[in-house]
Image (cartoon, helix red, strand yellow):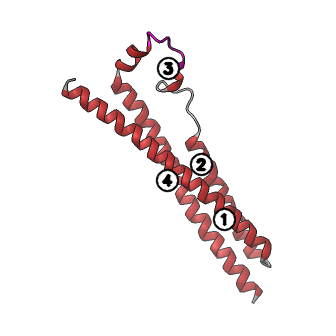
């Protein structure tokens, strides 16, 4: 195997590993968002809520729902992609080696675009989760301050 071929194989493996890391982070954040949502809902039902607390809490919960939507979008299978399982499912066993050995650079580019899209959704979801959490904390402070 030549040096350029080894470099392409290393780049291909790196991009696939980055996709796997992003998917793992997405799964963990989705579980965290679900736990925060459930916890906030439970606490909100137990506290006497005033109007500012209700409005702030509703906005925070809305941001958490938007975050969960982005996370689900990030993990949605790409069945229209040119690489991976969907392509292999359409090929005969004799065609697979040729498809795998042809144009690895194009596959790296396609996977890289997919990784960037997933990472962008994850980054936006983290931002929304932070904003939603801050609003939920503010709502709790409004509720506790209004109850005193």
- Tell me the CA gap for discs 3 and 4: 31 Å
Residue at the image point whose x is 64% and y is 53% from the top: 66
Label 4 close to label 1 by CB (< 8 Å): no
Q: Which stretch is magenta?
A: 88-95
Q: Which residue is mark 2?
A: 70
Quadrant of the image containing the N terminus: top left
The first of marks 4 and 1 along the sequence is 1
- Tell me the CA gap for discs 4 and 1: 18 Å
Q: Which secondary structure lies at badge 4? A: helix
- Residue sitting nearer the eye, 10 or 62: 10
Q: Which residue is mark 4?
A: 123
Q: Which residue is mark 1?
A: 60
Q: Which secondary structure lies at badge 2? A: helix
**Residue 72 to residue 29: above or below:** above
The first of marks 3 and 1 along the sequence is 1
Quadrant of the image containing the C terminus: bottom right
């Amino acid at each position: 195997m030549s040096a350029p071929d080894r470099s392409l194989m290393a780049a291909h493996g790196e991009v696939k590993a980055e996709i796997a890391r992003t998917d793992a982070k997405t799964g963990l954040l989705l579980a965290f968002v679900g736990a925060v949502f459930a916890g906030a809902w439970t606490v909100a039902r137990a506290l006497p809520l005033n109007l500012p607390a209700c409005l702030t809490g509703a906005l925070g919960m809305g941001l958490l729902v938007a975050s969960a939507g982005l996370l689900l979008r990030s993990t949605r299978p790409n069945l229209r992609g040119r690489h991976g399982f969907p392509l292999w499912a359409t090929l005969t066993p004799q065609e697979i080696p040729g498809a795998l050995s042809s144009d690895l650079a194009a596959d790296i580019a396609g996977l890289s675009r997919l990784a960037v899209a997933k990472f962008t959704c994850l980054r936006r979801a983290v931002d929304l989760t932070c904003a939603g959490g801050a609003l939920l904390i503010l709502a709790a402070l409004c509720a506790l301050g209004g109850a005193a």
